[in-house]
Every structure is written in structure tokens, then in C-alpha cells.
Amino acid sequence: MIRKILIANRGEIAIRVMRACYEMGIRSVAVFSEADRTSRHVLYANEAECIGAAPSNESYLCIEKIIEVAKKHKVDAIHPGYGFLSENAEFARRCEEEGIIFIGPRPQTMIDMGDKIQARRHMIAAGVPVVPGTQEQLNTPEEAIGVCKAIGFPVMIKASMGGGGKGMRLVHRVEDVVEMYNAAKSEAMAGFGDDTVYIEKFVEGPHHIEFQILADKHGNVIHLYDRECSVQRRNQKIVEESPSPFVDDELREKMGKAAVAAAKAVSYEGAGTIEFLVDRHKNFYFLEMNTRLQVEHPITEEVIGLDLVKQQIFIAEGRELSLKQEDIRQRGHAIECRICAEDTDNNFRPAPGVIQQLTEPHGPGIRIDSAVYAGYEIPMFYDPMIGKLIVWATTRQYAIERMRRALYEYKVTGLVTNIRYLRRIIDVPQFKEGNYDTSFIEVNQQRLRPRPGFKNDSEDMAIIASYIDYLMNYEENTDNTQDTSSALNRWRAFGLQKGVLRV
């Protein structure tokens, strides 16, 4: 039995894991950087310890510091969350050496599936369809040119150890191959410490569909159906939903079986995700496997009715899966929006700062996975995500209506967020009809821009009107009508100057 878990992460995912621990009667240990000393995950945990300065490479990426804290607090297991060390085989290996349970797959599995070239080989051997491309690393630009000519343009040059859209370059012409090849290798080395790249045929206008899987230590593997993740910008997901409005029952069954076969091919253990590209003709191809919990896992939890973190812990304890594939059913529809502190009108530039006021939506079918509060400062050192807004309803149409209402109720002041941008996504006809693919953001750029002169939404005007009303009431009850420095008189003078007010 696991009785104490260290969560080697921060923010909302750390709290998500701690909540499961609390319900299971398991004590939680938080680690935090100096920048996160007042973070909510630190306050929520049973025990907490600082592991270094704000930069990730001095704190959340320091394997030995985390292991030291785990030993000091006598934990039974470590949960890595997602990001940071969650897919680091060396971290999993160090946990094994210290007799600490790593809540995730075995180190060798992480190595096999973390290397995209090796993963392609495993999938081909298992009979899982893969995108046409290379099975060996590329060594020279000339070799890359030869491969591109052989499989035909457009192609993707991709980092073998990549993820999150880094180390990827789309190439349409032979004249651009050398430049894109060198750029992909450089970015791969900077981001992952390995400049190995390979080439895949670019599937135009695909859907990005992923299947959640669970696998125990006894050889049992099940899938928990699909998530549609095609609303993305530069390979970064923005909105996800489950089930996919594009996938029909026949395709869903085929992809589910392929996902299970993929997990069995590498003797997988734990919760993982098999990602596919699906073309307009509903041919699907293996893209990659994420050997961890996904950011978007809550929408699967909502439609399946399982707590994935608890399932991870049960598997880590050596228990067999309590459910068979025939027991799993999708129920209703769920949508997730990632709420971020970023300026979507300025190339999605991160916008860290202090949250002055926070009003989160409530009501039936609404879930917030977040770690922020009024007065909390979003640090500049980490991902700018504020939280995840998840809605569930009996149908997709009702879920869209609920998400629209929830985004309207969501208020964050003091910094710039992407909430208005998300509202515009939900209102695009393509999205409402479920007729979209990974080109959605690019195709709808004009629709997603704020209309000129209409940057401020109606609630902003309501706030201004309320403030003017407050000032008018204040001045009616005070004798300062002749005071030209008073707030209301300044508003009045401004209005006359701009022609907004008339005498």
C-alpha cells in the first residue's frame, strides 16, 4: 500500500494529484521553487519543501534534489505529473535505485517511446499504421533531400526526442530542405539535448485524435476512448473535446484496438496516450505515445467516469485493472479550454503578473482545475497556464452552450488572458458544427481576431458605467460640484472634449 506520495511538479497538476491522494487517505509532499513559495499546491500539501531557485533547471528539473527530499520525507512513491521530469527515464531509474515507486511506466518503455524513431519501429512491428517516412536517423542535409524527393512534398522534419511542437519544421519545396533541416536539428539540441531528426510525410488537414489507455503490471490493457485535439496553434493544443465529432463508431473501434496493440507492443504499464493523425478519408496513422498523464485528461474522466490519477496509483501498487474493455462506455460530451496568461493579440506573448480579481464559473457540469487565487502572481519562469476549464453535458450542443456560458462568467483582472479568444473559438461555425481539423486556427484567423473598435467586451462597458454611476451618486451626496479636480468632473470634461457628452 502506498501511504505517502511526493508530487514532483507544480501548479494545477500537483493539486490534481494531491486531491486524489486526499480522497485515498494518502499523505502528499510538495516540492517548490523560490518563485512558488506561496503557490496553492504548497499550501494544499501535507508536507512541503523548497528545492531551489525559480529557474526549472535549478529546481523542478533537479533529479537529485527531488530524490533527496523524497528520502527525507520517507515517501513510498513519486508522481511526476506532466512536463518537467514526467518522461525522463533517468528520473524513473533513480527512483527504482532508491526503492521509491515511480508512478508511471518502466524506464526502458520511456526510452523506447520517447525516441520517435524507435517508437515507429515498434508500431510497425505491432501492425499499427504509421505515417510514411524514415526509420533511421538522418545524418546529412543531402540525405534529407533524397528522402524528401522519394516520399514527396510536403514533409515534416521532426526531432526524434521531441515533443510540444519543438524541433519540427514543415517543408514544401526542395529549396528549403537544408535550412529547415538545420533549424530542426538546432532546436532539437537546444530543447532536448539530442539533435537526431527524421522525416515523415506531412498529412494535410488531419485530425489530431488521441486514445487514453490504462495498462496494469499483469498484461491487462484497456482504452478509454478518444479525445479530439485538433484546435491547436503551432502544435500546441488550445481546446480539446471528447468524444471526437469526426470519428464514427467503426473508426473508433479500429483506433481503440490499435491503441491497445501499441501499448502491448512495448509492455506498457500505467496511464498513457496513443496519438494518431487521421486524414479526411479516415485513414489513421500512429503519431507518438505520451508515457504520462495528459493535460487534457479531465475530459476523459468526465465522459468515462474514472479518476485517472487513482487508477495510476492502483497500478503502481500492483493491482489488476478492475474494469474490462466491455465495461467502458462514453457518457455525454466534455470540452476543455486552457486558460492562459497570454496576449493573443500580440502573437500569444506570455503575460505574467498579479491576479487582482478572480471570478471562476460555477453551476451544473462545470469543473475548474486550477492553482491560482486573487493576489497570486503568475511567474515568468513557467508555462503561463492559469487553469483548465472543463464542462460536461449530455450532448455536444449542450456542452458548447455550457462552455460559452462558463467563459462569459470567467473573470480575471490584473493581467491579460486568452479568455476572449476562447470565446471566439467556441462561436466559429466550423467548431460548432464539429467540422474542423488541425488547420482550424490558420483558416479562421480573421474570425478569431477582435473586430476593430470592439476590443472591449460588453462587461468592460458595464464596469465603466458602474463606476460612473458610483461617482455620480457620490457627488450627489457631497458638496464638491465646483471642484474641477473631482473624478466625475474629470470624466465630464473628457466626454465633452471627445464629443461623447453634450452640454
Image (cartoon, rainbow, N blue to C red):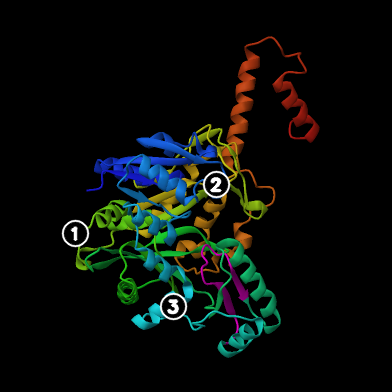
Residue that numbered label 2 is attached to: 58
* Residue under the image location 78 percent in, 30 percent down: 496
Disc 2 residue type (three-letter): Glu
Q: CA distance from mark 3 to mark 2?
A: 34 Å
Based on the displayed image, in which of its 4 quarters is residue 18 positioned?
A: top left
Task: Give the x, y percent position of residue 159.
Answer: 55, 71
- Residue 57 visible, this orientation: yes
Q: CA distance from mark 3 to mark 1?
A: 31 Å
Task: Give the x, y percent position of residue 489.
Answer: 74, 21
Q: Dot 1: few (<14), some (14–19), or many (≥20) neighbours within 10 Å?
A: few
Q: Earlier in the sequence, mark 3 or mark 1?
A: 3
Q: Earlier in the sequence, mark 1 or mark 2?
A: 2
Q: Is residue 483 left or right of residue 356?
A: right
Q: Are marks 1 and 2 in contact (CB under 8 Å)?
A: no
Q: Are marks 3 and 1 in contact (CB under 8 Å)?
A: no
Q: Dot 2: few (<14), some (14–19), or many (≥20) neighbours within 10 Å?
A: some
Residue that numbered label 3 is attached to: 120
Task: Give the x, y percent position of residue 371.
Answer: 45, 41
Q: Secondary structure at mark 2?
A: helix
User: Is residue 168 one of those drawn in magenta?
Assistant: yes
Disc 3 residue type (three-letter): Arg
Read off the magenta span: 152-170
Disc 1 residue type (three-letter): Ser
Between marks 3 and 1 in the image, the one whose residue lies nearer the viewer: 3
For this rendering, which residue is in front, 261 or 498?
261
Residue that numbered label 1 is attached to: 322
Q: Residue furthest right?
A: 497
Task: Give the x, y percent position of residue 465.
Answer: 61, 31
